[in-house]
Amino acid sequence: MPLYVYSITPKDHPRRLDGLHGVGSEPSPLRTVTAGPLCAVVSDIDEAIRPKRRDLTAHQEVQERLMADGAVLPLQFGYIATDELSVRTALESDADGYLATLARLEGCAEYHVRASQADETPLLQQILEDLPEARELNERIRGGDRDPGLPLALGEMIAHEVQARQETLAAGLTEALLPFSREHLARPPSASDFLNLSLLVPDEHKGSLRTAEANIAREIGDDIDLRFSGPLPPYTFVQ
């Protein structure tokens, strides 16, 4: 029977799963498949599993409960194995690698940091003050110059400057946060964000990270929307 696989843990992990349920419309009990020094937390499934809120929540609750008691390798939502033998084979095939990753993640949680421009008006005004060329184009447009190339030239100039300044700010934010992390991964920003950063933070640095978050937020002001989320299972750092 197919198995939905949630996480990999060391064999001696307590795996306190009482009160939790698995994914699916009629969830099967959570259980473990053991192979040597490792275990996989699984449940039987007999239906297609899609990312519904109910199942996403169940998946995440398993990870968080396990993470509270020790290192865990959380699998991304939707991982399905054909049967128990395939799970055991996978554990045995790279046991040393899994154990090394568990050791690397011990005592750590993942935090996400994202930043976007909450209000662009002050930034645009600052750019016009700082760049004589942009200010001149803006004044010509406001003065009634009908040259159709002026708005495009001004737009391109401002867009380039906005990107450059946001990249500089993102680099500064990253540099300020790295001392609190054991590892980090900067992803390409999406949508309106100009920073998308994942941090692997040891337990002893979590308080300091939150203090730094508050200090940085005060320093950059209300024009920047700085968003922290965590502690989270370390999905990003499972290799």
Image (spheres, rainbow, N blue to C red):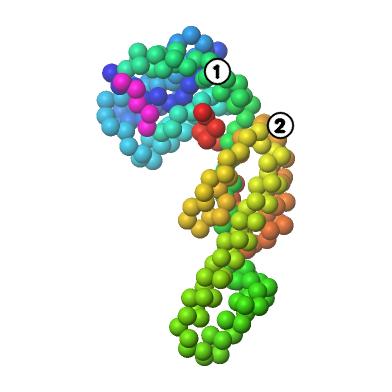
Q: Quadrant of residue 237?
A: top right
Image vertical order of residue 42 relative to residue 171, above or below:
above
Residue 192 position within the rendered picture, expressed as x and y whole percent measured from the top left: 51, 58
Residue 188, relative to residue 56: is it above or below? below
Q: Which secondary structure type mostly characterizes the magenta part of the structure?
A: loop
* Picture residue at 57% right of the left edge, 61% below the top: 163
In the displayed orientation, state which residue is furthest to the top. 36
Q: Which residues are magenta?
A: 78-82
Mark 1 vs mark 2, CA separation in Å: 22 Å
Along the viewing direction, whichever of 186 and 27 lies nearer the viewer: 186
Query: In the image, what residue occupies the spot 45% across and 83% down?
Result: 148
Left or right: residue 49 compared with residue 116: left
Q: Given the current orientation, which residue lies at the most extreme bottom position?
A: 144
Q: Is residue 218 above or below residue 149?
A: above
Q: Position of residue 32 (x, y in %)?
A: 43, 16
Q: Residue at x 51, y 33 (%)?
A: 235
Of the image marks 1 and 2, the number of the one nearer the N terminus: 1
Q: Which residue is the site of mark 1?
A: 99
Residue at screen point 57% across, 44% down: 186
- Write down the quadrant of residue 179 in the picture: top right
Q: Is residue 31 visible?
A: no
Name the kind of residue labelled 1 in the image. Leu
Determine the secondary structure under disc 2.
Answer: helix
Image location (x, y in percent) of residue 227: 59, 50
Q: Nearer the viewer, mark 1 or mark 2?
A: 1
For label 2, the residue is 204
Name the quarter where the N terminus is drawn.
top left
Query: In the picture shown, does residue 127 fall above or below 62?
Result: below
Sort mark 2 into few (<14), some (14-19) or many (20+) by Cα contacts within 10 Å.
Answer: few
* Total residue callouts: 2
Judge left or right: residue 234 versus residue 177: left
Q: Nearer the viewer, residue 184 or 151?
A: 151
